[in-house]
Amino acid sequence: MKTEILKLKKEKNAVILAHYYAPSDVQEIADYVGDSFYLAKIAKSIEADIIVFCGVRFMGESAKILNSNKKVLVPNLTADCPMAHMVAEGKIAEMRRQYDDLAVVCYINSTAELKCQSDVCVTSSNAVRIVKALENKNIFFIPDKNLGSFVAKQVPEKNIIINDGFCPVHAKITAEQIAKEKEKHPDALVLTHPECEKEVLDISDFIGSTAEIISYAGSAAEKEFIICTEEGVSCRLIGDNPDKKFFFPESCPCCTDMKLNSLKTVLDVLRNEANEITVDEEICRRAMLPLDKMLELAR
Ligand code: 13P
Ligand code: SF4
């Protein structure tokens, strides 16, 4: 399958993008592997005719919005992020009525429709920097309550109103599970994604996006780490650091949507040019504004 994918990729002038949570064999055949921010930047600059995005729906959708002349294919159209939908109908309009100077800050893990109603997008690697850079005092952070609270703690000078969405995968990780791992590996550093619950963030040594966790583990002098994010990052962590040990909480967080990407589904979509992401022209135009603003402010 790998040989066939590489052949088709060349024939059709396609590139494959994969998130760190995609299965390891998919990461291996991808041209670019990274966190959400890196992949959004890459998607915008791609010149090939076809982008195959091995992630979840909002990632393929963002690639289409940022580079709308390209054909964006996803291995499985049902691979979605539940958190992307977790903003109650009418909530944004209600918040805008309450605050004149409100900035709606939208985690990229969101539907295109939510992006259309937002002022700026962020990812887990740039949210603090971008919120700090905004002139607005009042911020409505959607959809993730955990990333929102993490940002609020880092930017106390702003009034950050937090929506109540969450990632069901990261929510499974508990402080008790970390304490158990710490008992077994007392020297291990706890590296955590900001989508985890506050109790987990509070006992972590480092908080960052998937790419930041990978980079931190690579450059740290320590040899053991407890990793509080989806297990797909282990592929890169182990590959880059054969002399280090990585432990996951016993709930072993696994995003079943990300795992819908497989060599077979990549091959199928490349062969048939199936599962194309389409975004209504007007939605595309409006959703591009907060995405472009993110790229500009994060620069
Ligand atoms: P990052 O890619 O920003 O680390 O976010 C993780 C995630 O949950 C993507 O869905
Ligand atoms: Fe969404 Fe969580 Fe899966 Fe990321 S890990 S895609 S936030 S469900």
Image (spheres, helix red, strand yellow):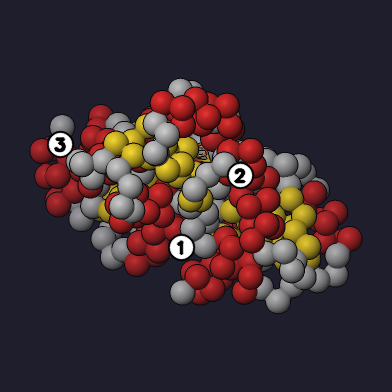
Q: Mark 1 vs ligand 1: CB under 8 Å?
A: no
Disc 3 marks which residue?
2
Disc with the residue nearer the chain's start (3 vs 2): 3
User: What number of labels is visible?
Assistant: 3
Q: Mark 3 vs ligand 1: CB under 8 Å?
A: no
Q: Can residue 22 be seen from the camera position used here?
A: no
Q: Residue at x 40, y 49 (%)?
A: 213
Disc 2 marks which residue?
202
Q: CA distance from mark 1 to mark 3?
A: 28 Å
**Residue 101 in the image, given as x and y percentages of width and height:** 81, 71
Amino acid type indicated by mark 2: Asp
Camera-side residue: 106 or 113?
A: 106
Q: Quadrant of residue 273?
A: top left
Q: CA distance from mark 3 to mark 2?
A: 42 Å
For residue 15, side relative to residue 214 (left or right): left
Dot 3 falls on a residue whose secondary structure is: helix
Dot 2 falls on a residue whose secondary structure is: helix
Q: Residue furthest top?
A: 250
Q: Mark 2 vs ligand 1: CB under 8 Å?
A: no
Categorize mark 2 by other alpha carbons within 10 Å: few (<14), some (14-19), many (20+): few
**Residue 292 in the image, given as x and y percentages of width and height:** 52, 69
Camera-side residue: 126 or 66?
A: 126
Camera-side residue: 266 or 283?
A: 266
Of labels 2 and 1, the one closer to you: 2
Q: Residue at x 46, y 41 (%)?
A: 190
State the mark number for residue 248.
none
Amino acid type indicated by mark 1: Leu
Q: CA distance from mark 2 to mark 1?
A: 35 Å
CB atoms of marks 3 and 2 within 8 Å:
no
Disc with the residue nearer the chain's start (1 vs 3): 3
